[in-house]
């Protein structure tokens, strides 16, 4: 569904949205008791109760909370209706199965000690490999498909093991093994657009962000990093799924998406960072959270931007990337103070310096790390470029 639905809309698509909200338990039956009555499909109304339920769902699932059902929110609603056992799960390259049932499968396999990659609700090749390994261990034909026999075995074993954070431990070990030197590491810099950014701000946003991205790229290259841009200068950013796929193809070690925000309230201002996390599914990227925190703290320490802190989100640009990934909202174009700062090249240098220093600090152990706001890129070139 590519259309957008909001307060006041009606029709069959709204009836479908209401049905999904009811099925996952965020909207009572009384709100649309005739939603699927064939004679009333055209009368299903997107009223205040539906909007409130959509907002609650968006909050639960780490989406932008606007009460509007666009393609991303509708996709998440559709995913939420699946429970483990409702359908056969397998790896379909180019069209990955996604849903709450995949989340459940990945969580159970992780609890049992099998690797599935990131717990992200997508049945990708790593999840398929985890299913095969589980099947081999429990005498099931290892076809990588989660069918009745595999589900039965999981149901018998699932009460035996709970808890832990194996993916977080593995991520920490990978970072440690990568070593502190930046030479040879790959960082993808993405120029995006805030989900709330009106069209009239797009040109200004692109100009600021492309310039900032190039300043970050230049500093990273000077430290020995291989840096790639997802979007060439002055080009319009592609879909989030396309940019995430590009980052995955490069085999990047880190991913940074740059964006600017907007608000109907001109007083809204400040900088915020986002990482992949879904509180409803109790999953998050521990490495992404750490990277976001480093970038956020460095920028706040070096500038007078208001600290809006770090937050987990399930946006495609964070969920579909396979490496530690963050999105940085560097300010509000609807705020005169933020806009004045962002349009100053010297201030963009400050932001670029903070970002590159954060990349280095991501790979440093606490014993040799500097205090926030004091490490300089020139020091990185002198001290950390060569092993």
Image (cartoon, rainbow, N blue to C red):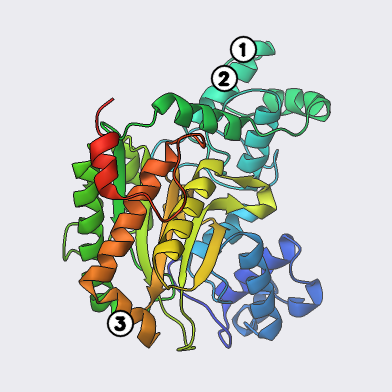
Q: Nearer the viewer, residue 86 or 320?
A: 320
- First in sequence: mark 1 vs mark 3: 1
- How much space separates mark 1 and mark 3, taking CA atoms? 61 Å
Q: Looking at the image, which residue is at 59% across and 75% down?
A: 14
Q: Which mark is residue 117?
A: none
**In the shown orientation, is residue 300 left or right of residue 244?**
right
Q: Looking at the image, which residue is at 74% across and 26% down?
A: 154
Vertical relation: 108 (above or below) 333: above
Q: Nearer the viewer, residue 337 or 302?
A: 302
Q: Say which quadrant the C terminus sits in.
A: top left
Vertical relation: 149 (above or below) 371: above
Q: Which mark is residue 340?
A: 3
| x and y, in percent, of residue 147 in the image | 64, 29
Q: Looking at the image, which residue is at 72% across and 60% down?
A: 24
- How much space separates mark 3 and mark 2, taking CA atoms? 55 Å
- Within 10 angstroms of label 2, few (less than 14), some, or many (20 or more) residues? many
Assign a secondary structure to mark 2: helix
Q: Looking at the image, which residue is at 66% across and 12% down?
A: 137
Q: Which numbered mark, 3 or 2, is in the foreground of this view?
A: 3
| x and y, in percent, of residue 188 in the image | 30, 46
Q: Is residue 323 visible?
A: no
Name the residue beneath numbered marker 1: 136
Name the residue beneath numbered marker 2: 132
| Displayed quadrant of residue 42 | bottom right
- How much space separates mark 2 and mark 1, taking CA atoms? 6 Å
């Amino acid at each position: 569904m590519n259309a957008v639905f909001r307060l006041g809309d009606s029709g069959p698509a709204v009836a479908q949205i209401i049905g999904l909200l009811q099925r996952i338990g965020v909207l009572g039956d009384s709100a649309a008791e005739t939603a699927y009555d064939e004679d009333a499909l055209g009368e299903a109304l997107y009223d205040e109760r539906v909007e409130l339920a959509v907002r609650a769902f968006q909050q639960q699932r780490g989406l932008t909370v606007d009460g509007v059902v666009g393609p991303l929110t509708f996709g998440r609603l559709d995913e939420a209706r699946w429970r483990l056992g409702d359908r056969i799960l397998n790896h379909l390259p180019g069209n990955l199965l996604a849903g709450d049932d995949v989340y459940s499968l990945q969580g159970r396999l992780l609890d049992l000690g099998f690797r599935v990659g990131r717990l992200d609700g997508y049945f990708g090749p790593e999840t398929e490999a985890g299913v095969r390994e589980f099947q081999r261990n429990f005498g099931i034909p290892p076809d990588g498909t989660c069918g009745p026999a595999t589900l039965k075995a999981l149901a018998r074993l699932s009460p035996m093991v709970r808890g832990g954070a194996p993916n977080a431990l593995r991520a920490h070990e990978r970072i440690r093994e990568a070593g502190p030197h930046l030479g040879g590491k790959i960082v993808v810099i993405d120029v995006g657009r805030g989900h709330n950014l009106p069209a009239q701000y797009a040109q200004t946003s692109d100009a600021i962000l492309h310039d900032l991205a190039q300043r970050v790229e230049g500093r990273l290259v000077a430290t020995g990093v291989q840096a790639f841009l997802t979007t060439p200068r002055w080009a319009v950013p592609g879909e989030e799924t396309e940019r995430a796929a590009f980052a995955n193809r490069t085999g990047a070690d880190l991913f940074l998406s740059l964006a600017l925000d907007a608000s109907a309230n001109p007083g809204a201002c400040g900088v915020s960072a986002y990482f992949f996390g879904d509180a409803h599914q109790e999953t998050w990227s521990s490495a992404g959270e750490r990277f976001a925190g480093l970038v956020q703290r460095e920028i706040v320490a070096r500038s007078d931007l208001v600290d809006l802190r770090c937050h987990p989100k399930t946006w495609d640009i964070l969920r579909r990337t396979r490496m530690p990934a963050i999105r940085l909202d560097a300010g509000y174009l609807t705020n005169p103070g933020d806009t004045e700062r962002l349009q100053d090249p010297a201030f963009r240098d400050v932001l670029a310096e903070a970002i590159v220093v954060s990349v280095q600090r991501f790979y440093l152990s606490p014993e040799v790390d500097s205090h926030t706001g004091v490490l300089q890129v020139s020091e990185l070139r002198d001290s950390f470029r060569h092993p």
